[in-house]
């Protein structure tokens, strides 16, 4: 559970001078104090000396990359949300934003959005979030920042995380602790790479734990070809959003039940917006995965369970923007070890959509399915 007080701070990072006054007013209206930093040194100095509730930054600012790397490379900031202001709401811009460990975004210049977002975060933090441990995981990577970033993602999915720096340490943990259910290991884990270790474990007749091998996108084909020969194993793009590894874990964990679903959930991230039906206030988000009958939208501030929404998003695989009607059927609050696995957001079931809009979305989903089989 989080313990927040009324004077907590929001750190504003980057060259936000054109909107600094209005942002400070929104932060104050939400019950916080704004602290501004235009350079990475200034921002890191603030973080070294003060506790902050959240960090809001300008995407693309020279100060940002180092700050994001520091924050998401330190477990101390696991529960500190990162919110990006973007000048262009596009997949091209949001990809790097989420890959840096950012939790949500807002279009720069839309007054009132930040106040609403912070106010809802404050309320959910005061209420606290459910905490529980689902299973043990081993994160094996020689690069500290990636280890901590992955660990944050897994802790939010209710895993207890153990770090390892090389193959020998992974093997030792697996030998001593048979309850480990997940290994996430860098493809280049010293000394000879995690694939050799995986193949050795499977050669011993051990089909568990689930094994995720992370590596750069340009090695995907090679890594995937070797992983195809192993059960309960998958690839994760180390340059993509860290939450994508949870999608891989879920896919492996639920593999026996896939045939019982009406349609598969496919990883798919594009900008989206939504509003509660009957209201005018629009909230921005992004899809995390999609199925034929539903969408998982990532947002720090999901509406209440059962709410009926109007959702706008680009139909998958090059389709046009569609306007869909959907109901919130489950939601996940922001916070470590809370709710269902994946980033903060909500699961939506499509219901009562305009037939033409639904047909366009379904056609896009079918194209996406076909692309995954190529």
Image: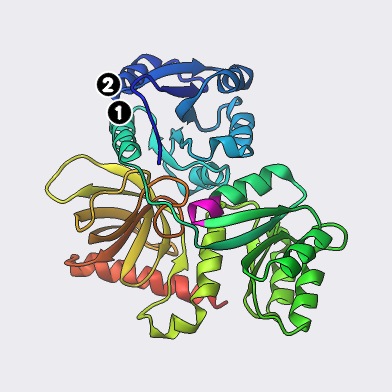
Count of residue discs:
2
The residue that mark 1 highlights is 115
- Regarding residue 188, the answer to whether it shows in the image is no
Q: Quadrant of the C terminus?
A: bottom right
As rendered, which of 174 and 94 lies closer to the eye? 174
Whether label 1 touches label 2, CB < 8 Å: yes
The residue that mark 2 highlights is 29
Residue found at x 27% / y 71%: 359
Residue 157 magenta-drawn? yes
Name which quarter of the figure residue 358 lies in: bottom left
Horizontal and vertical percent for residue 9?
42, 22
* Left or right: where 359 falls relative to 69: left
As rendered, which of 311 and 117 lies closer to the eye? 117
Residues packed near mark 2 inside 10 Å, few (<14), some (14 to 19) or many (20 plus): some
Horizontal and vertical percent for residue 366?
40, 75
Residues packed near mark 1 inside 10 Å, few (<14), some (14 to 19) or many (20 plus): many
* Left or right: where 6 falls relative to 182: left
* Left or right: where 228 falls relative to 88: right
* Left or right: where 266 falls relative to 31: right
As rendered, which of 86 and 50 lies closer to the eye? 50
Q: Earlier in the sequence, mark 1 or mark 2?
A: 2
Residue 193 magenta-drawn? no
Q: Is residue 71 above or below residue 62?
A: below
Which residues are the magenta region? Answer: 153-158
Residue found at x 70% / y 75%: 227
Q: What secondary structure is the magenta-colored segment mainly?
A: helix
Horizontal and vertical percent for residue 237?
64, 58
């Amino acid at each position: 559970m989080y313990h927040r007080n009324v004077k907590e701070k929001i750190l504003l990072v980057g060259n936000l001078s054109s909107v600094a006054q209005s942002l400070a007013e929104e932060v104050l209206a939400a019950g916080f104090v704004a602290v501004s930093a235009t350079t990475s040194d200034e921002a890191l100095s603030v973080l070294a000396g003060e506790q902050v509730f959240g960090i809001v930054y300008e995407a693309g600012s020279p100060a940002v990359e180092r700050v994001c790397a520091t924050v998401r490379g330190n477990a101390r900031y696991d529960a500190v949300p990162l919110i990006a202001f973007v000048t262009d709401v596009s997949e091209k811009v949001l990809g790097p934003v989420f890959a840096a460990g950012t939790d949500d975004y807002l279009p720069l210049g839309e007054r009132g959005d930040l106040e609403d977002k912070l106010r809802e975060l404050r309320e959910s933090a005061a209420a606290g979030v459910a905490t529980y441990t689902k299973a043990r995981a081993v994160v094996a990577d020689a690069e500290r920042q990636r280890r901590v970033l992955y660990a944050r993602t897994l802790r939010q999915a209710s895993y207890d995380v153990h770090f390892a720096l090389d193959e020998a340490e992974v093997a030792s943990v697996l030998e001593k602790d048979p309850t480990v259910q997940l290994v996430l290991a860098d493809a280049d884990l010293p000394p000879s790479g995690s694939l050799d270790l995986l193949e050795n474990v499977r050669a011993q007749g051990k089909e568990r734990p689930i094994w995720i091998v992370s590596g750069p996108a340009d090695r995907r084909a090679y890594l995937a070809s070797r992983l195809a020969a192993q059960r309960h194993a998958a690839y994760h793009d180390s340059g993509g959003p860290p939450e994508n590894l949870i999608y891989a874990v879920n896919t492996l964990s639920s593999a026996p039940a896939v045939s019982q679903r009406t349609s598969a959930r496919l990883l798919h991230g594009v900008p989206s917006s939504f509003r509660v039906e009957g209201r005018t206030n629009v909230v921005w988000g992004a899809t995390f995965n999609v199925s034929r009958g539903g969408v998982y939208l990532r947002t720090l501030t999901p509406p209440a369970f059962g709410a009926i929404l109007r959702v706008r998003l680009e139909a998958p695989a090059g389709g046009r923007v569609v306007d869909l009607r959907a109901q919130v059927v489950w939601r996940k609050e922001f916070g470590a070890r809370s709710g269902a696995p994946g980033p903060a957001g909500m699961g939506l079931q499509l219901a009562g959509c305009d037939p033409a809009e639904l047909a366009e979305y379904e056609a896009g989903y079918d194209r996406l399915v076909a692309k995954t089989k190529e």
